[in-house]
Image (tube, rainbow, N blue to C red):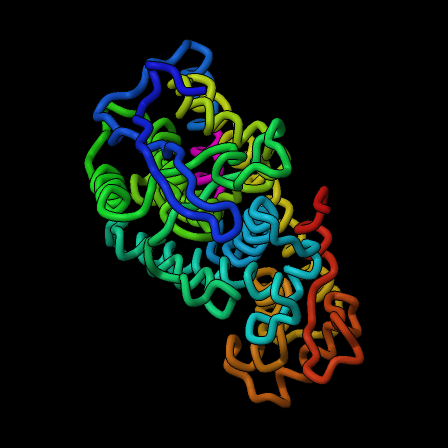
Amino acid sequence: MFHNASPGKLVAISGSDPRLGSWEHHAFVPNPLGTQMPQLSPQAFLQVADARASLAALDSTARQLPNPMLLRSPSLRREAQSTSALEGTYAPLVEVLTADDDEPTTPELLEILNYVRTANYGVDWVGSGRPITASLLNELHGLLLYGTALHDKAGGLRDSQVVIGRREDALPTDLSIHGARFVPSPPGLALEFGVQELVDWLRADHSGVIDPIVAAAMSHYQFETLHPYYDGNGRIGRLLIVLYLQQVGVLSEPTLAVSPWFEARRTQYYDHLLSVSTSNDWDGFVQFFAQGLNQAAQSTRKQMIALVSAQEELKDVIRSSTLRADSAQALVDVAVANPSFTVRKVEAELGLSYGRANKLVGQLVDLDVLDVVDPGAYKRRFFAPRVLEVLTSGAR
């Protein structure tokens, strides 16, 4: 599969299977990323330009909003659902949006909500001006796997060999290593150096030499190819795209949801990543990657505008009612920023007494602005049906 132009090398590895005995194979170790852009076609540059334009439009729209952070939580939950689905952890979007942060009801929801916390931590880290580091990646990984079956593997680089996928032509009797679609770097010093080289590269100033979209594509490929963790590499790697674009100033408020587009094209996504390793096909990968960012930015911007419109619609309902308290308008903002919430959340966010917050929520339920997620639940959670309709439009 691997051509001479491959941007890496194959290294011999060996091990032992408890049932089938000793084995020998090869793993792929990518070369460090270069200081120049790979050779790209005019078509790739056009895709990159389109992505830059769409990201600029998204960021401009976010900057014009009175409080763009209101839209971060719903955007992150949508991203969490799709990026987890790409890795085989699926829950319907409605369940993700209305789930209790503190008491997820299934292991799948726990993992997905862990991603929201992980992303918020990364966004706040980069937003405070701190660079992306190897220790940050480990912290993000620890947050992502907290409380899961792989909790004991969280927060550190893997110390044994892993494989990715299985080839269609693999025999049922083949060892997983022999039937694997791709075998990433072996553990140890080479993997540690590879991760450190990547974060050093991310901190370097590539302006004027490498377009930020191309740099994001290059770093995403490198991270996924190193595959430094036992689990969660795809989710951390796709989060890294947004964090990098935030770090270099392409995005000021990182509301971009990249994974829904890639999830819908997962086979192409994995094929393009593999093609860089096997035949140095940066052009095909950059085109695909830039197209994904372009469509993701357009989709996120469209949803952002729709959420702002829904916010105004709900406030108009209140204006036309007998309610005159400013807190009623502020509660709409809470409902937009939090796809589901409790009365305690309203109490804390608006600085009201519990009794006043409970009465206010009830008044907005009477106006059909809010509804109850599960009327029979002990801890009632509320949501705005109009907001949920916007967030689930076109989703599965």
Q: Which residues are magenta?
A: 54-63
Q: Nearer the viewer, residue 61 or 50?
A: 50
Q: Is residue 3 visible?
A: yes
User: In percent of the image, x 67 and y 56: which residue is there?
Assistant: 91
Closer to the camera in the image, 59 or 20: 20
Q: Position of residue 62 (x, y in %)?
A: 47, 45
Would residue 290 appear left or right of 337 to someone viewing this image? left
Q: Main secondary structure of the magenta part?
A: helix
Q: Residue at x 45, y 20 (%)?
A: 1
In percent of width and height, residue 214 lies at 36, 27
Q: Exactly how many numbered labels are in the figure?
A: 0
Is residue 86 one of those drawn in magenta?
no
- Does the stretch in magenta take in 62? yes
Decide which of 223, 161 is in the foreground and name it. 161
Is residue 235 placed above or below 114 in the rendered structure? above
Q: Is residue 63 visible?
A: no
Q: Quadrant of residue 44?
A: top left
What residue appears at the point 53 percent right and 31 percent down from the top-left corner? 269
* Residue 67 position in % (x across, y down): 47, 56
